[in-house]
């Protein structure tokens, strides 16, 4: 008899605190275990990175970086991430253990599982939790019934966030990936049948369950459309649609729904047929009866209210917010949905069309689909030859090309990281659905140093043939000895032995202590303050990790930069103030909130003000 291979982690104790027990699941991130936390006496879930990835520095800091990001998200419906660390050759992350019944077990063998209103209640709680994650820029990416837990109150919680993804950056899961996963869950709840994730058509539960409300059918179809452009953009938008449909559905009888009473049928007694007189005598009587019925019908039409109706206006070219306002002003409580579409003349964000079309008669609660323009499908490829790879990516994305493939080639004339050519060539028309290939002079790819200590960062750079230049700088959130910034950013290409500036945190800036010498003159105090700033600030030989020292210290008491504002477009090099700190834009961006804990986002942290 074959002996099963023992689990390499089960029974291990990490950092003297977490005792690993039964393995729950495995994915690209590693293996997840139910574990006992000795410090709190509670059950937790510990995800351990796969052993073959521990020596892969980019995989390690991607794992730890996502865990750190997840620790900042809090919602009752999300399994909270509590801790992460490394114990020898084990890299791990710890999250809350959610108690309840996995949705996979709820669905097992049941058909159908929930009536529509209850199914939508479960789905709404899933979307509320996902909305909190999406608001922080976090995508689950692997939401399945076994990662949704239903509590005794009927509400659902989400667990099992992957910490690594197999896909490349340009193909990584996004918020619409989570929306489709929720649509699959809703389909399964209503029909009791697990849906095929690879289905090439939108799912409609009415194909399996009779007499479903049309709105419910459309709700599932919109979320499960194979083309992400036609799905709600994120959990928040899909939650709005779910709540609108919930309000339109009658509640179950046991929850105070429709009246269970029914009229009692009355059997009519059999009466003898009346005798009819001659036709000439009956004609006046029949005419009078017709006039009476017509009068009664007209009176009833005038006295009894009709269902409210309105005509759908022509919204072509109108901004999405204004279109919603116009539809709301009709007073019909319409269910408004959105999908993206290409359009040659309507500006991005404007309405390119609607379903039904302009002039259609709408009744209360009808659904209206607004197609929002994302600009023309075809655009000219910008000339990026001679630019760096990062510059080329920025210009291509600004032109609407989001799928970018990089191929490295040897070049004796160009520095590593320089764009040699593009396919399609500059000036040629490209399809925004297709990838643009940029050929780059080969060199060494700069790894991400997020979450590493100084020693780990130097080792990671040395192993790929790059040179680390370490500088120290105070940082409010990164622990002393940890990497707070790097320059150039991850993914950049450098020649062999190229230098990477690694900024290492020395902890928060020390608070100023009042002078103990009463005889110290104001000029001496000013000079002392300047000396202290020279030693501890951003100047005086230290740099910010993004391109060398700045010269002089920052004024910690006031910000000369304007406050960051959502919706404002910021060009490369512009500076803003936010939450008492000053930031500089690394590249063109909009609606990206500055965050001192983000090392390679669009903002560079320039210090307190």
Image (spheres, rainbow, N blue to C red):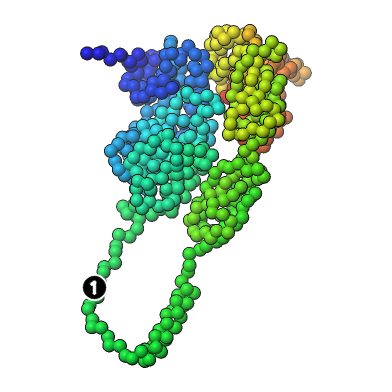
Q: Is residue 504 left or right of residue 142?
A: right
Note whether 33 is above or below 289 in the view shown: above
Q: In this view, does 365 lie to the left or right of 488?
A: left
**443 or 252: nearer the eye?**
443
Q: Could you tell me if residue 341 is visible in this image?
A: yes
Which part of the image, by quadrant, shows the C terminus?
top right
Instruction: Please state the horizontal and vertical placement of residue 137, each as a whole percent of the image.
Output: 53, 32
Which part of the image, by quadrant, shows the N terminus?
top left
Q: Could you tell me if residue 321 is visible in this image?
A: no
State the SS at label 1: loop
Q: Residue at x 37, y 18 (%)?
A: 18
Note whether 356 is above or below 573 in the view shown: below
Instruction: Please state the horizontal and vertical placement of residue 551, each as a whole percent of the image.
Output: 74, 17
Q: Which residue is drawn at 66% across and 24% down?
A: 422
Instruction: Please state the horizontal and vertical placement of residue 504, each as a whole percent of the image.
Output: 60, 14
Q: Which residue is drawn at 29% across and 64% down?
A: 262
Q: Which residue is drawn at 54% across and 13% down?
A: 453
**502 or 606: nearer the eye?**
502
Q: How many marks?
A: 1
Q: In this view, does 502 lie to the left or right of 104?
A: right
The extreme right residue here reads: 523
**Crowding near pointer 1: few (<14 within 10 Å), some, many (20+)?**
few
- Residue on which disc 1 sits: 267
Q: Residue 329's image quarter?
A: bottom right
Instruction: Please state the horizontal and vertical placement of residue 416, each as a whole percent of the image.
Output: 66, 14
Q: Residue 41's image quarter?
A: top left
**100 or 429: nearer the eye?**
429
């Amino acid at each position: 008899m074959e002996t099963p291979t023992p689990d390499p982690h089960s029974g291990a104790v990490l950092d003297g605190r977490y005792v690993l027990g039964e393995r729950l699941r495995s994915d690209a991130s590693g293996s997840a275990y139910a574990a006992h936390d000795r410090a709190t006496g509670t059950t937790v879930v510990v995800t351990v990175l796969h052993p073959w990835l521990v020596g892969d520095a980019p995989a390690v800091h991607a794992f730890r970086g996502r865990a750190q990001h997840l620790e900042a998200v809090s919602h009752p419906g999300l399994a909270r991430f509590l801790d992460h660390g490394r114990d020898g050759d084990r890299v791990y992350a710890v999250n809350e253990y959610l108690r309840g019944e996995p949705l996979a077990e709820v669905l097992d063998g049941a058909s159908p599982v929930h009536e529509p209103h209850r199914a939508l209640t479960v789905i709404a709680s899933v979307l509320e939790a996902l909305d909190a994650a999406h608001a922080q820029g976090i995508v689950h990416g692997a939401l399945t019934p076994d990662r949704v837990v239903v509590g005794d109150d009927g509400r659902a919680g989400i667990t099992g966030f992957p910490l690594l993804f197999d896909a490349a950056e340009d193909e990584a899961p996004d918020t619409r990936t989570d929306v489709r996963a929720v649509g699959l869950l809703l389909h399964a709840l209503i029909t009791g049948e697990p849906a095929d994730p690879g289905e090439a058509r939108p799912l409609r539960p009415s194909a399996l369950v009779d007499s479903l409300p049309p709105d419910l059918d459309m709700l599932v179809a919109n979320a499960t459309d194979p083309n992400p452009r036609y799905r709600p953009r994120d959990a928040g938008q899909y939650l709005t649609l779910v709540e609108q449909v919930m309000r339109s559905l009658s509640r179950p009888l046991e929850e105070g729904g429709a009246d269970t009473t029914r009229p009692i049928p009355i059997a009519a007694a059999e009466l003898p047929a009346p005798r009819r007189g001659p036709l000439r005598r009956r004609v006046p009587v029949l005419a009078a009866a017709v006039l009476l019925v017509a009068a009664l019908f007209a009176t009833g039409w005038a006295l009894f209210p009709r269902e409210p109706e309105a005509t759908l206006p022509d919204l072509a070219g109108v901004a999405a917010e204004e279109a919603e306002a116009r539809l709301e002003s009709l007073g019909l409580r319409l269910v408004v949905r959105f999908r993206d579409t290409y359009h040659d003349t309507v500006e991005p964000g404007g309405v390119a069309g609607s379903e039904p079309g302009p002039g259609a008669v709408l009744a209360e609660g009808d659904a209206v689909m607004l197609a929002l323009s994302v600009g023309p499908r075809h655009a000219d490829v910008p000339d990026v030859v001679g630019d760096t790879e990062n510059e080329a990516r920025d210009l291509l994305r600004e032109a609407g090309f989001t799928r970018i493939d990089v191929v490295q080639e040897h070049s004796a004339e160009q520095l590593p990281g320089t764009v040699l050519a593009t396919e399609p060539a500059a000036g040629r028309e490209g399809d925004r659905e297709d990838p643009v290939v940029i050929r780059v002079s080969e060199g060494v790819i700069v790894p991400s140093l997020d979450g590493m200590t100084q020693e780990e960062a130097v080792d990671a750079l040395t192993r790929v043939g790059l040179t680390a230049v370490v500088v120290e700088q105070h940082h409010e959130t990164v622990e002393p000895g940890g990497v707070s910034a790097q320059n150039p950013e991850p993914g950049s290409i450098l020649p062999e032995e190229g230098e990477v500036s690694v900024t290492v945190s020395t902890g928060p800036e020390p608070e100023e202590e009042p002078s103990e010498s009463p005889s110290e003159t104001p000029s001496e105090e000013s000079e002392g303050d300047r000396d202290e700033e020279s030693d501890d600030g951003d100047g005086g030989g230290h740099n910010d990790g993004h391109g060398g020292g700045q010269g002089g210290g920052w004024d910690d008491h006031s910000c000369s930069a304007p406050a960051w504002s959502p919706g404002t477009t910021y060009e490369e090099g512009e500076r803003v103030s936010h939450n008492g700190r000053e930031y500089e834009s690394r590249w063109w961006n909009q609606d990206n909130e500055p965050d001192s804990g983000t090392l390679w986002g669009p903002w560079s942290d320039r210090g307190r003000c």
